[in-house]
Image: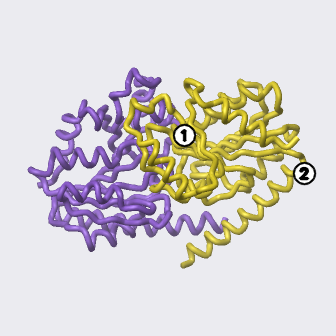
Chain colours: A yellow, B purple
Amino acid sequence: MKRVVVEKKILERNTESAQRIREILKNKGIFSLNFMSSPGAGKTTIIEKTIEALKNEIRISFIDGDLDTDRDAERVRRLGVDVVQINTSGACHLDADMVLKALDKVSLDCDLLIIENVGNLVCPATFDVGADKNVVILSVPEGDDKVKKYPVMFNVADVVLINKIDLYGVLDFDRDKVLKEIKEVKPEAEVFELSAKTSAGFDKWIKYVKNLIRR
Amino acid sequence: MKRVVVEKKILERNTESAQRIREILKNKGIFSLNFMSSPGAGKTTIIEKTIEALKNEIRISFIDGDLDTDRDAERVRRLGVDVVQINTSGACHLDADMVLKALDKVSLDCDLLIIENVGNLVCPATFDVGADKNVVILSVPEGDDKVKKYPVMFNVADVVLINKIDLYGVLDFDRDKVLKEIKEVKPEAEVFELSAKTSAGFDKWIKYVKNLIRR
């Protein structure tokens, strides 16, 4: 019982901080995306390719959440965008307070703020980080049963990216089942099928992101 | 500060319950394995194949932890072993109290108890569930950077199974790097490379499990 009460307080505080983030970003005209997925589904690679496709037209900043290393932050920094690393010291998700603090450090002279959450298909779903849209990535090798097994995550998704579609046909993956289950869990989610490796389907996703930008 | 204290108490209580599980299982001569991995790394498939290989020689019971569905429990129940499903109602890991309660329901007239944790490479690492050995599965499609990115999980691993090795060569995966990083994070971990799909490498793993059984 005590644990539940403490968790409720933590979540209430988180919602307040997320609201504060929304206000700050809205005032600056910044659109924000929060990327979530299992480890290895392709968050960093998709973010890299998205930045590469957009960086000549749109100013982008990046907040990277990781348990312990700055490997992902380094990969993205090489692309020339402003990067702030949040090291969660073992915590399984970003929370709004962490992101709020990172906003003091990252350049807000941008049109798009990309947040990469900790690789985890459970905990990040519960902690609103104040982003305009939650982007959940599901990769083909993870299997076609994940939507119903992790419904909380797919329920908070505004966008679902099905990644590694170059492995359609190579691995067992019932695409129709996955699309149907996404529709059941979150009917209004936008779904894009793509491969960060071969770039298949990437154009549609990039066009979609461009249309989101506020300016 | 308050949060840290509460977490410490939760973990202390968990350790006590884990100790109680160890005593119960030891008294009954049962050996136990706790399987942990990202979603889609192949926990259930490896467990199914392990049970198939052993069930004629060894009595096996199975405790399945899942967020919301009983899909995995059903898959294993078909093999004719006793199965108890723990539905964590959204919690991101099993804890020792959940497993302790499940011990009242599952058949303890067995030689091997298999526990399947929630698909998550972060949280389950912190909660000892009283198993004799923690088995962490890393699958090739997740990528070769996961050991250093999720060190807490690999640090609690007694055994690491590198799964989906039929995709060596198909996907970019630096095997030597992964083996080296496992050695750095947990030098004493036993490592097996296998494919639950093609059965490559499975013999060695099965032989290893057979040698663990107490009777």
Residue A49 can be seen, yes or no = yes
Q: In the rendered image, which residue does mark 1 sit on?
A: A162
Label 2 is found on which chain of the structure?
A
Image quarter of residue B1: bottom right
Give whichever of A17, A131 is nearer the camera: A131
Circle 2 packing at 10 Å, graded few (<14), some (14-19), many (20+), is few
Residue B155 can be seen, yes or no = no
Asked whether, in this view, residue A206 is left or right of residue B213, the answer is right
Residue drawn at (56%, 45%) of the image: A37
Q: Nearer the viewer, mark 1 or mark 2?
A: 1
Question: Does B159 appear above or below B19?
Answer: above
- Residue A120: percent from left, percent from top: 54, 48
Q: In the rendered image, which residue does mark 2 sit on?
A: A27
- Label 2 residue SS: helix
First-in-chain label (1 vs 2)? 2
Count of all numbered marks drawn on residues in the image: 2
